[in-house]
Amino acid sequence: MTTPKKLFIKTYGCQMNVYDSERMAEALGGEGYVETKDAEEADMILLNTCHIREKAAEKVYSELGRIKPLKERNPDLKIGVAGCVAQAEGEEIMRRQPAVDLVVGPQSYHRLPEMEARLREGKKALDTDFPEEDKFDELKARPKAKRAPSAFLTVQEGCDKFCAFCVVPYTRGAEVSRPVSRILEEARALIDRGVREITLLGQNVNAYHGQGADGSEKSLADLIWALSDVDGLERLRFTTSHPNDMQDDLIEAHRDCPKLMPYLHLPVQSGSDKILKRMNRSHTADSYLRLIERIRAARPDILLSGDFIVGFPEETEEDFQATLDLIREVNYGYAYSFKYSTRPGTPAAERAQVDAAEADDRLQRIQALITQQQQAIQQAMVGRDLNVLIEKPGKFDGQMVGKSEYLHAVHIDECKAQIGDILPVRIVEAKRNSLAAVSR
Ligand code: SAH
Ligand code: SF4
Ligand code: F3S
């Protein structure tokens, strides 16, 4: 038997990339690769990249610079770039860093085995097509090995929204939904391997409209109900949603479906109608707030999270204040804020930019407010009885850690529960980034 070749994958960006990296490892597993955590012993290094902000994209080139010398020690080492930088920059990557052997866009991962064969012939390989065939159908099934109790499952990919700041519609292409039957099949296979919680992924997941077994189009809520009938699956989540696609049946599922967790990531980006319009978001601050009211009427304890961009072109102090007002009104359990980053090829890149020091200052102020809200919500969990999906051993002997319904990390000392158990606990303390609990 030949010794297996070693594959090292480094993943940047969103959860969809985490899912894709797993699938790439499986596709190359069929070609005799096993994964390693040590880049120095790898025969192939793949960077699964993110193009969302300039910093994210630049990281890739500095990482490539660090990896390149490994080729001197192992002349057979192949270096590949996958993900959204691969899609956006294509051949340019090989020009900028000639040590790169392979560039593969997110819609072509099922072609990796063929591409790998080319590399072994001493050639380079590039594929940034948006092929007709569905990569998910072509990718090999997951192997049977046991895995962590919480898994991602991509159900929808791409985006047709074209927010003026965003590269995703260009790097991931048009919106596509996978058929219900394929998702159910994949979910059952995950459950056989020990999974109890599935997070359904899509850049615009609540716009899901996949084909059902009867040939008709199904909504995300329909899909959630179908998955909730699968034995052994205990928890469902989904991300990321767009406010404009938050249909009534999905809000009702948050009220009626016990397996759907009370957590919703619903980015709004800004609280100023002028800026929202220029972002091409096609909702207003008020329509968003009214939507939140309806969601909270259906599921009063739901924990909301959001994304914000500060320093978008033409954002004034007044616009920024409107964003802070909206945050105060919603009260987020989690929120992620970013300084606007100019992305070549997007409409906003051409516009007059906000002064960098001013944008930095706004970022600090928004983050202070968000942190304050997050801490208060975490603090309010103390004394509550929650259920924790146990994910792994903690830092200390006898300690286990997992996630509450609300996605808070929870650690339990002297814990007898096993990985994959759902343990009833009482929260006893809120720490900076996690909650402490005792079993009840
Ligand atoms: N599909 C999701 C997530 C897109 S990317 C959605 O529609 O919400 C994740 C977040 O990155 C976005 O919500 C946005 O807040 C941020 N982002 C996207 N483009 C950006 C840019 N050019 N500069 C700064 N932040 C950006
Ligand atoms: Fe980007 Fe999300 Fe807007 Fe689509 S909806 S363009 S992914 S921010
Ligand atoms: Fe980044 Fe691509 Fe995800 S740009 S955020 S890896 S879809």
Image: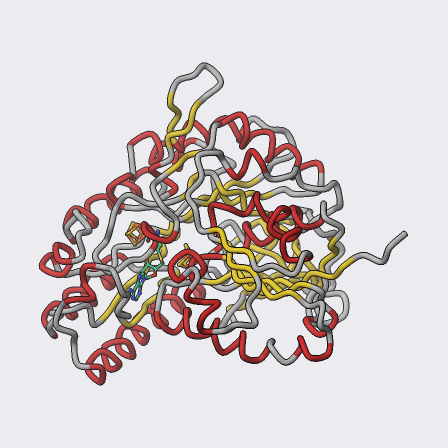
Relative to residue 94, is residue 352 drawn left or right?
A: left
The image quadrant of residue 438 is bottom right
Instruction: Please provide percent x and percent y for residue 48.
Output: 52, 60
Q: Which residue is drawn at 26% across and 81% down?
A: 360
Q: Nearer the viewer, residue 263 or 83?
A: 83
Instruction: Please provide percent x and percent y for residue 115.
Output: 60, 51
Picture quadrant of ligand 3: bottom left
Relative to residue 424, is residue 166 drawn left or right?
A: left
The image quadrant of residue 409 is bottom right
Instruction: Please provide percent x and percent y for residue 401.
Output: 64, 61
Q: Residue at x 71, y 74 (%)?
A: 40
Q: Residue at x 45, y 70 (%)?
A: 95
Q: In this view, does 300 lie above or below 181?
A: below
Q: Residue at x 28, y 72 (%)?
A: 339
Relative to residue 9, is residue 288 drawn left or right?
A: left
Q: Which residue lies furthest to the right in this view?
A: 1
Q: Please count the marks in the image.
A: 0
Q: Nearer the viewer, residue 432 or 46?
A: 46
Q: Nearer the viewer, residue 145 or 230?
A: 145
Instruction: Please provide percent x and percent y for residue 412.
Output: 65, 62
- Which color mode does the image show? secondary structure
Relative to residue 67, is residue 59 drawn left or right?
A: left
Q: In this view, does 220 lie above or below 39?
A: above
Q: Which residue lies furthest to the bottom in this view?
A: 357
